[in-house]
Image (cartoon, rainbow, N blue to C red):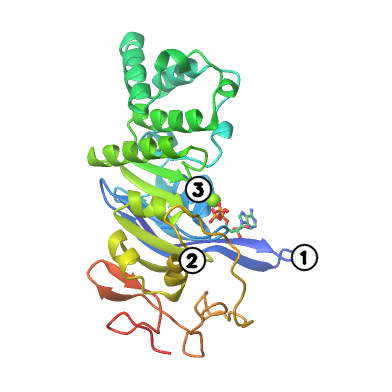
Amino acid sequence: MLEVVNLSKAYNVGPLGKEKFYAVDNVSFHVADGEIVSLIGESGSGKTTIGKMILRLIKPTGGKIIFNSVDIQSIKNRKEYYRLVQGIFQDPFSSYNPIFKIDRIFEMIREEFYPAITKEEWSKRVKKVVEDIGLNPSEILGKFPHQLSGGQLQRLLIARALLIDAKFLVADEIISMLDASTRIDVLNTLIKLKEKGLSVLFITHDLSLGYYTSDRTIILYRGSIMEYGDTVKVFKKPLHPYTKMLLESVPTTQKVWSNSYISLHGRNVLPSFCKFYDRCPLGDSTCKNVSFEKFEESHFVACVKVTGEGEHVA
Ligand SMILES: Nc1ncnc2c1ncn2[C@@H]1O[C@H](COP(=O)(O)OP(=O)(O)OP(=O)(O)O)[C@@H](O)[C@H]1O
Ligand SMILES: [Mg+2]
């Protein structure tokens, strides 16, 4: 369904804007039909940048994104693309036009995407979808966005994607604003939708949410993938020293790890070196020109230190 091929995004930085900073650096992965793939990485690792490139909100510097066998940059009809591919972001407030009530916002979706459906039929669908995401239509539909909580608005964004009948969802930290019980509801909604064929790129920095939700997991660090594979395999047998560090730094399954690791060794990461070189306890001069190796079926790692047994050579 969706294939990301050698995707990069560079920003000009430095005093004269002459240096390049790669927020996303040569990233490749795919998401199959009906699959939930977690994109996990600490703050600043490039997750949102990848999501925004998939949603065509920012333009890649290199590489391409293929959706249903078509390069998305070549799709002229944006509306058709957004009928199939929808995004839900961290901050739900910014996704709504504050001057319209929720029922009007949903009616505008009909006008834009499904003008052939009658208002009555649409209204029935809206109510059903709002109930499906665990909200009461009579309490919600007559309100303005500012009269609703962040969690309600976030769930309404999922309802919006459902109404549009999107096939691919970029879900960027969508449960950050929800309380624990609502989180489970929303995650279960996503899992139900997946069973109906929806594909999801589930962006999170919360390992436990990724584990609960996804079929496959991608571990991103400073814009590059360190390890990816079946979620259970990545979590049960983490191979990359970075993945291991992440998992070991989560004392309970509920804890969100912070971005507070300090550089362990004070090394500089040279261009051909592994991005984790400066923080890796195993880093040495061999840690360069690293490519992905298949460790087992559906489990890949980019680390020269991993042996065939999944141990590390010092
Ligand atoms: N317009 C820009 N110019 C320069 N650097 C940028 C720009 N936009 C983003 N970045 C940088 O790109 C990197 C990746 O940002 P991104 O928002 O993708 O991270 P993230 O993984 O989503 O983080 P978080 O978990 O905090 O949401 C960050 O270091 C950020 O500072
Ligand atoms: Mg982000």
What amino acid does circle 3 point to?
Answer: Lys
Label 1 beta carbon within 8 A of ligand 1:
no
The answer to whether 137 is drawn above or below residue 308 in the figure is: above
Q: How far apart are marks 2 and 3 (CA)?
A: 29 Å
For this rendering, which residue is in front, 216 or 85? Answer: 216
Q: Which of marks 2 and 1 is in front?
A: 2
Determine if the C-beta at disc 2 is less than 8 A from ligand 1: no
Q: Where in the figure is residue 291, as x and y percent of width and height? A: 39, 78
Left or right of 268? Residue 117 is left
Give the number of the disc on residue 249: 2
Q: In this view, does 178 lie above or below 144?
A: below
Q: Where is residue 134 in the image (x, y as percent from the top left)?
A: 37, 26
How many numbered marks are there? 3
Give the quarter of the figure containing the C terminus.
bottom left
- Mark 2 or mark 1, earlier in chain: 1
Choose between 4 and 172: the one closer to the eye.
Answer: 172
Q: Distance between the residues labelled 2 and 1?
A: 36 Å
Secondary structure beneath label 1:
loop
Give the image quarter of residue 232.
Answer: bottom left
Regarding residue 59, the answer to whether it shows in the image is no
Could you say which disc has been placed on residue 298 in the image?
none
**Residue farthest toward the right in the current orientation of the protein:** 15
Residue that carries the numbered disc 3 in the rendered image = 52
Q: Is mark 3 within 8 Å of ligand 1?
A: yes
In the rendered image, residue 94, in percent from the top left (x then y), is placed at 58, 33
Tell me the residue that label 1 is attached to. 15
Could you tell me which secondary element the residue under label 2 belongs to? Answer: loop
